[in-house]
Amino acid sequence: MKLAILSRAPKAYSTQRLRTAALDRGHDVKVLNTLRFAIDLSGPEPDLQFRGRTLSDYDAILPRVGASVTYFGTAVVRQFEQMDVYTPNTANGISNSRDKLRATQILSRHQIGMPATTFVRNRADVLPAIERVGGAPVVIKLLEGTQGIGVILAPDTKVAEAIIETLQSTSQNVLIQSFVKESKGRDIRALVVGDRVVAAMRRTAQGDEFRSNVHRGGSVQGVTLDPAFEQAAVRSAQIMGLRVAGVDMLEGADGPLVMEVNSSPGLEGIEAATKLDVAGAIIDYIGNQVAFPEIDVRQRLTVSTGYGVAELVVHGGADLVGKTIAESGLEDRDITVLTLHRGTTVIPNPRRRTALEPQDRLLCFGKLEEMRSMIPERRRRRDKVRKLPKEPIHEP
């Protein structure tokens, strides 16, 4: 395999470990400065130049795009994608993960547990926003901060209001997030490669510092994750379009709370804490994908007129509940079930004898008209919101 590592820091620990792991496995690997590419759109096919010369052919790239060059770096990654060069992290995945608001919006759509979060711009909306996330203390985050920079713990409402007002006056966009007291100063970093967690560590802040980042002096120790934490990490990375990612989670009272999905996770801390060859796992995954690449099902299976990929939800009380896939009549309607999602469990290629349960989500390929007819009429949002009973008034 001929691999290019896109990095502006060739001597950094992570870059060196990835390069060494690739060389040890007999691959041809080069570290290329992301900013020295030129995107060439002048010819009949998309192309790239590097240091003023036509780029040679590569089988795969591994982007290590820094936050300060996200726009240009993702443009380069996107050009490699147009040239059919494999990348474990797509340009869209990198862009989405860099914007904390966008990432939170995407993950919230998929029922990923996260700290309560809100985003406002008008000063009059700040106090109601703080109350919506449970009141002070609150965590205030810059949308594009990294390594714990731009993360502030406000102990009370007045301080939070002043901090937010100051940041907004300098054209900074900030998130307001609930403070998870039970995990103060601690979090979990899970390193996801493909469809599994290859290493995980607990980071603990030093002294009164509530940020546990290694760059802030936090200590680390290797941990074995509970299945719920592992599933949350893998699902979050895949939803973001990343096959190599560091997923940061808080240990909430009710389970994992995802804070961030990092598209260029550092390897030094987690390899030291776990004594595992994380770099080697990443290189092995990329090599396997180059030899036998995954495909985007939604793109490849929608080439036939009238056919496509859609998700059907088995609603309680529907005719499908309790029936097996064979008995459901889906096959008679020219619909094939590719994957069944049940809670946090994913069942690929479910057998025809699999019985369907309420809230099962079926990823299907078939006639779009037939699948469209099986989707119930969409309820308006206000119909979904239950009216809460009024709190009783207690006279003094």
Image (cartoon, helix red, strand yellow):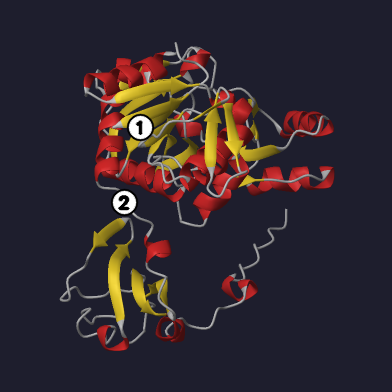
- The one nearer the camera, 90 or 163, is 90
- Depicted 182 relative to depicted 242: above or below: above
Q: Quadrant of the N terminus?
A: top left
Disc 1 residue type (three-letter): Leu
- The one nearer the camera, 145 or 13, is 13
- The one nearer the camera, 41 or 348, is 41
Disc 2 residue type (three-letter): Glu
Query: Mark 1 — residue?
Result: 191
- Locate residue 321, reporting x and y percent: 29, 80
Q: Which mark is residue 294?
A: 2
Q: Is residue 116 visible?
A: no
Q: Is residue 258 visible?
A: yes
- Locate residue 166, reporting x and y percent: 81, 29
Left or right side of 41 for 158 = right
Query: Where, by quadrant of the figure, is residue 223 drawn?
Result: top left
User: Would you call the spot at circle 2 few (<14 residues within 10 Å), some (14-19), or many (20 or more)?
Assistant: few
- Depicted 183 relative to depicted 217: above or below: below
Q: Earlier in the sequence, mark 2 or mark 1?
A: 1
Spatial CA span between label 2 and label 1: 20 Å
Left or right side of 181 for 285 = left
User: Would you call the spot at circle 1 few (<14 residues within 10 Å), some (14-19), or many (20 or more)?
Assistant: many
- The one nearer the camera, 338 or 46, is 46
Please state which of the two labelled residues, at mark 2 or mark 1, is closer to the viewer.
2
Q: How many marks?
A: 2
Disc 2 on helix, strand or loop?
loop
- Locate residue 391, reporting x and y percent: 64, 62
Q: Look at 50% across and 44% down and name the residue there.
A: 93
